[in-house]
Amino acid sequence: MSKIPVAILGATGSVGQRFLSLLENHPWFEVVALAASDRSVGQKYASACRWILAEPMPEFAREMVLTAAAPEVFEAKIVFSALPTEQAREIEPQFASAGVAVCSNAAAFRREADVPLLLPEVNPDHIALVRHQREKRGWRGCILTNPNCTSTGLTVALKALQDAFGLKKAFVVSLQALSGAGYPGVSSLDMIDNVIPNIGGEEEKVEWEPRKMLGALGADGVELADLRLSAHTNRVAVIDGHIVCVSVELARQATPAEAAQAFAAYQAPLAARNLPSAPRPVMVVREESDRPQPRLDRLTGKGMTTLVGRIRPDPLLHLKFVTLSHNTIRGAAGGSIFNAELLVQAGLL
Amino acid sequence: MSKIPVAILGATGSVGQRFLSLLENHPWFEVVALAASDRSVGQKYASACRWILAEPMPEFAREMVLTAAAPEVFEAKIVFSALPTEQAREIEPQFASAGVAVCSNAAAFRREADVPLLLPEVNPDHIALVRHQREKRGWRGCILTNPNCTSTGLTVALKALQDAFGLKKAFVVSLQALSGAGYPGVSSLDMIDNVIPNIGGEEEKVEWEPRKMLGALGADGVELADLRLSAHTNRVAVIDGHIVCVSVELARQATPAEAAQAFAAYQAPLAARNLPSAPRPVMVVREESDRPQPRLDRLTGKGMTTLVGRIRPDPLLHLKFVTLSHNTIRGAAGGSIFNAELLVQAGLL
Amino acid sequence: MSKIPVAILGATGSVGQRFLSLLENHPWFEVVALAASDRSVGQKYASACRWILAEPMPEFAREMVLTAAAPEVFEAKIVFSALPTEQAREIEPQFASAGVAVCSNAAAFRREADVPLLLPEVNPDHIALVRHQREKRGWRGCILTNPNCTSTGLTVALKALQDAFGLKKAFVVSLQALSGAGYPGVSSLDMIDNVIPNIGGEEEKVEWEPRKMLGALGADGVELADLRLSAHTNRVAVIDGHIVCVSVELARQATPAEAAQAFAAYQAPLAARNLPSAPRPVMVVREESDRPQPRLDRLTGKGMTTLVGRIRPDPLLHLKFVTLSHNTIRGAAGGSIFNAELLVQAGLL
Amino acid sequence: MSKIPVAILGATGSVGQRFLSLLENHPWFEVVALAASDRSVGQKYASACRWILAEPMPEFAREMVLTAAAPEVFEAKIVFSALPTEQAREIEPQFASAGVAVCSNAAAFRREADVPLLLPEVNPDHIALVRHQREKRGWRGCILTNPNCTSTGLTVALKALQDAFGLKKAFVVSLQALSGAGYPGVSSLDMIDNVIPNIGGEEEKVEWEPRKMLGALGADGVELADLRLSAHTNRVAVIDGHIVCVSVELARQATPAEAAQAFAAYQAPLAARNLPSAPRPVMVVREESDRPQPRLDRLTGKGMTTLVGRIRPDPLLHLKFVTLSHNTIRGAAGGSIFNAELLVQAGLL
């Protein structure tokens, strides 16, 4: 059976590179086009791209000539978007309208009522919004989004608690890696011997996105979960892997051991469980007093697994714990690919 | 007028070095002895100490011969203790009993009802506990303690809010510097491209110490403040300066602007205001969206000032903000010296 | 065919962990024992070892009980030694005497005339020293050594030049990674925002070891190569991967392009070419102006390949270039395993 | 006596900020204008500048309004130039022609025969080139340059050797700090857990500039010193302070102890010795086996002193050693100011 032709928008950036790396040898998808900004169009990928991953640049990409990010330029059934928000807002609908499924890592459409904000191991049923979206907008294609990288691991962990105990409040503080800011991103003069106690626009996303993903899908779309979140976000000197310190108030009190059990036992809904990019396992609970740690644990489950550790009572709410998730794999490119797989399996492509 | 003779216990370690550096040219105190562990006794300071501060080793110390940490070995009216907790528990009372005032950075006696846990810009009146202590224990000397480095900046900030609005709850997450772990302390293999999401024993201190310092002094000692705290503590790749992300519930709601005003206007009580080590000013409010930052701001007010920034509403409690405090100056050696100054001025030496 | 039973001495340390990681699923070897220091003997590996690699601890090792490092304790035909020099000097001969082949990463025996100092892609013929060794010492086993981690990549690069143009002098300055110092090794307070311009004992090794490996094997052992080296060694804030800046004087002048060609064309001698751990390829020449870089390139060829870049004329000697080699894979554990494979293939086990 | 009015070109950048910081409270100079690029002209310095130094922004500068970099815009007798090379080439002569003395950190004119390349503690007599320059170019003002930051400390050390023993060859490898690349400069993704083994254009400067400074001033200008240099340059994760590993061949052999003595005894020529910015002392020799180190030693002598350590025999040439110099103080802004002081004292302003 022939593979599904896919393209990458924003292929030369930090997340774009992850898309290439993860799509090399993908069992279902074949990259047929790489789109980049105007000044790179016409160049070979290997010349135009400053590759920043430790994995080598995939061979298939080296000689590919960069194209413009427009639906008429190439034939792809799915495009993976690593575009900046402003460009995504303009370009992604052009593809959707032209019949292409856009699996986007950008924030532009995450809050639209008819656009699924998806983590297949959390809310695969939200994929059904694609039908509303097509009907409402007259698109033959569609736009699917994955959440912000910090919301990702956090939401997976919150989902396990929501299912097991119900969930009312979460207080979250992130220690975020540099790859999330793209390349060149943060200056080294700002990161050696330093912390930046803010990431612009991030806290609003972290306080809202989990509510959509944990909300119930009704006839009128997703009803936001009745969950209140407060977020502080920080940038630290780490290449990949976002740490989040979380305190939660549950609907019914649970011990740390019960929570650990709920995390470890959590499984993706059936619809997502056997997809090629499904995390195996979805969550890992670390028992050590000082884990998870970004450098040591971020590649667990090929970077798709959410790690949890240090589960303990919280004096103000119910429980405290720490999560770790790979921000450019599970939290970005890997997430968009996982979403695309769900779309294909749901017969919605 | 001649200066007061003082000694340093644990003089070769990370905090011991700060004591030396801060006591060079102190207007009231003169270092007459440096005590260290048995294996260094008898050596010159310059040979025995691996100096790790960017400021040069004070000239006065280079040729001083290290002594044992015992009251009969030297004549000092005040000893500054940078001893590990276990040693502090044993050695500090020997000095207090022998008539020496011990200004300690160790945790050993912080929770004792008759031992002041002091930040002179916060609770200088607690110094009165020294009288109870002497009476109860039959000591001619005394033990004064300063809080854990993370509690320090946090408590200064909370005090300004407590005075202005009352204070009910605080959720705090620290991003702590390496110098707090001493030397050699944390392995470089644990800190390059990494975060350690735990600091042993720290969370318990941060959840309790502010309550003592913010408590009222009554006839029976300090009544712990009716404040509930939850803490997560993390180690990050920063040399000096602890960042703390704080969310607070106040007794009466305040806007970020009102809180900023309360922080900026906060002054040390009169008893502490004019001491040599008093922070000038006590607090600085940074208006920028990404400050305070450890590398850029930790030396504000010679490392004695507490910085606050990013004051904004909190969706769960009332306000969010970030504090920064220099952990080995305000949070350790500088704090002990400031306490000693308060003791002298109070006529309790 | 059954696998050859092997053991690891010093199994819990930084290099010991690499041995485990590289021996998992090795086609020829099966780990039957893990030896550690007295205080860990009797504990399970998973409890006794603070695992510091990003790759997970191999499953086979978790439940293995640590043994003493003595030949009578377990049945292994080969032991891989990650012992400190002093212990290696005492313990390795015990194994060799008892009939075990010791493939050692320690420096203890590298300079012995009858002990091969081996890089199979450079001097596989030196393995013949094993016969002298057995005869002279009356051992049934033997000791093989691999060079210091900085000498490793350097010597591979020098060998390609020696073969093509002859070699007279080399000036080398290393920028070395932290994993070479073991765990906990270098304090984080010494590495954040810093360089340490010395590594004790390293310069002597780097100035001597390449001469033995590049020397000719004669009837009386190895004649040191007529090559003069000068080395400066530095520690920098890198986890894995040693950079070496090299300037060389050749026997006959070569252009950078000729040198690049010589590096790229260099192949391991036949004896080493098809061994399981042989680097594929032996060397990679990077054309970019700023490569090789440790974070991006150290895992080339599974960490066994030597990288070269920035080949350019040298105003004092003939050529300048930069090498990169993974210090705990090619430069330590991977090197010892590669040596063991050579021993087996040579029929000397 | 009133101070000499000075201005800073490129005032908002990394080196520009150092100029401001070092000129605050300068005994001879008063900053009357701050010039910046077009997009910042008209803004207040405090709003336009992202201040990156740990020292606070000088109060005098906060409210100053940025001007264009043109001689008719303000009245200054000296301008300090932190302009990029291309802009310096165009703008600096406009000031010189208009009667202003330009003390430049830019590379644009360093190689011009009639432009002094100055380190006052090394070659203050070269200031006399100013007369040739004025005559030849018809300028009332002039251009003075200071060398590249890596050449700076290196040349001070070489000068001490040249005077004492004569000097024939030097092999140098730098480990350079990030502040030399300006702000934002190097991406944090390129520096965490990494080394960049190249700095564009730097090696050519380091191989040539010391020869001009160590050359003799004759009737026809400076005769380049008969010294051959080879340089490798690297970027490492350090904020400030360039380490250089040096091996030298002297005209007459010296022992490490003799060299240490020559370094320690070296004094600036009389013309430079008592200037306000003169390093005190010019050089410091560290005896420890692992010093100098950037974080611990860069501020020696207020960042103007050159440090030397690890003096030992070199197997290829005569001696090996390590130098450290603060790259944005002695190696940039402090150097230009020191040059300006020399110009004033020489009566050439």
Image (tube, coloured by chain):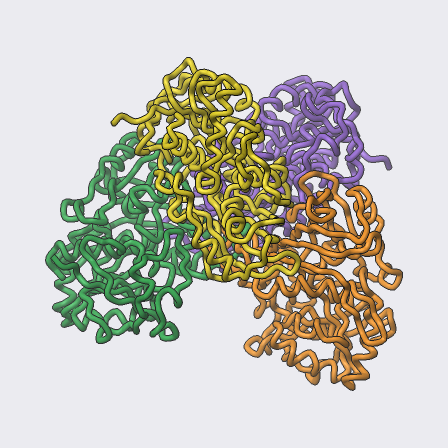
Chain colours: A purple, B green, C orange, D yellow
Whether residue C311 sits left or right of residue B68 in the image: it is right
Q: Position of residue B325 (x, y in %)?
A: 34, 46
Q: Is residue B139 above or below residue C256?
A: below
Asked whether the viewer can see residue C172, the reply is yes
Q: Nearer the viewer, residue A125 or D101?
A: D101
Name the residue rendered at 53%, 35% in the picture.
D217
Q: Hey, which residue is sitting farthest top in the picture?
A: D72
Q: Hey, which residue is sitting farthest front in the picture?
A: D219
Name the residue rendered at 19%, 70% in the picture.
B75
* Residue B28, quarter of the rendered image: bottom left
Name the residue rendered at 24%, 41% in the picture.
B280
Q: Is residue D164 above or below residue B87?
A: above
* Residue C346, quarter of the rendered image: bottom right
Q: Position of residue C124 (x, y in %)?
A: 83, 65
Asked whether the viewer can see residue B187, the reply is no
Q: Quadrant of the N terminus of chain D?
A: top left
Q: Position of residue A176 (x, y in %)?
A: 52, 42
Q: Position of residue A231 (x, y in %)?
A: 44, 39
Q: Quadrant of the C terminus of chain D?
A: top left
Q: Nearer the viewer, residue C45 or C261?
A: C261
For the image, the number of numbered tags is: 0
Whether residue B276 sits left or right of residue C24 in the image: it is left
